[in-house]
Image (tube, grey):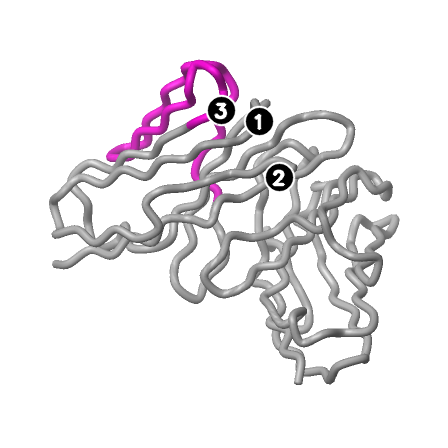
Amino acid sequence: DAGVTQSPTHLIKTRGQHVTLRCSPISGHKSVSWYQQVLGQGPQFIFQYYEKEERGRGNFPDRFSARQFPNYSSELNVNALLLGDSALYLCASSSRGYQPQHFGDGTRLSIL
Amino acid sequence: GQQVMQIPQYQHVQEGEDFTTYCNSSTTLSNIQWYKQRPGGHPVFLIQLVKSGEVKKQKRLTFQFGEAKKNSSLHITATQTTDVGTYFCAGDSGGSNYKLTFGKGTLLTVNP
């Protein structure tokens, strides 16, 4: 079975632009979570969605938003990009929200 | 908000030596999870501990969850070069707003 897939792999944007990152969970998993990982730090929780509803939100500004589709795939949107948004964005899926997370390879976002 | 602290930040050992990393939460956890991330890779789930005082073993790895469910440890016996990577603990406090909080991780390097 395929693991968690994320697209794109790499992305370069400039300040003020917006970006959409995509994630497809493992087949059968209904929960998707998004994390931001800065070099040398642990993943920071952004959102969790389960059955298309937001079940958890981390300490990120309103510029960050997400949604989950009927097929359980998910998008993370970031508006008005700042230099500090440069990071690896990880998507993880699980069968239920509190179950172990299965991570994708991430999207490396660079802001110029 | 909830904080999860890990020590040490770095650990360099000779192959065959033991290694331990410690994790402490500012709040009581409903469960704790451990992940390993190889350089350039994504976090990979190792184990989940749920019960107070729980101890689980995976070959050379031993995981413990404290009696108060606020601390945990990972011990590796007789390290091998394949153990190289960053080990993260991640805690979930439970509640309606799901949030998995990762520690900053312990980077383990092993000298052959």
B46 inside magenta stretch: yes
| Circle number at residue B99 | none
Q: What's the residue type where badge 1 is placed?
A: Thr
The residue closer to the viewer here, B27 or B75, is B27
Residue at 42% x, 22% y: name it.
Answer: B65
| Circle number at residue B100 | 2
Which of the chains bears the disc numbered 2?
B
Per the image, label 1 sits on a secondary structure element best described as loop
Q: Position of residue B25 (x, y in %)?
A: 51, 31
Mark 1 or mark 2: which is in front?
1
**Whether marks 2 and 3 lie on the same chain:** yes
**Whether marks 1 and 3 lie on the same chain:** yes
- Please state, as top left, top right, bottom left or bottom right, where the C terminus of chain A lies in the image: bottom right
- Sequence-wise, the earlier of marks 1 and 3 is 1
The residue singled out by tag 3 in the image is: B70
Which of the chains bears the disc numbered 3?
B
Q: What's the residue type where badge 3 is placed?
A: Lys
Per the image, label 3 sits on a secondary structure element best described as loop
Q: Given contact means CB atoms under 8 Å apart, are the residues at marks 1 and 3 in contact?
A: yes
A54 inside magenta stretch: no
Displayed quadrant of residue A16: bottom right
Give the distance between the C-alpha atoms of the residues marked 2 and 3, in whole angstroms. Answer: 14 Å
Q: Position of residue A53 (x, y in %)?
A: 86, 41
Q: Is residue B102 left or right of residue B80?
A: right
The residue singled out by tag 1 in the image is: B27
Per the image, label 2 sits on a secondary structure element best described as strand
Give the distance between the C-alpha atoms of the residues marked 1 and 2, in whole angstroms. Answer: 12 Å
Residue at 82% x, 73% y: name it.
Answer: A80
Residue range corresponding to the magenta coloring:
B45-71
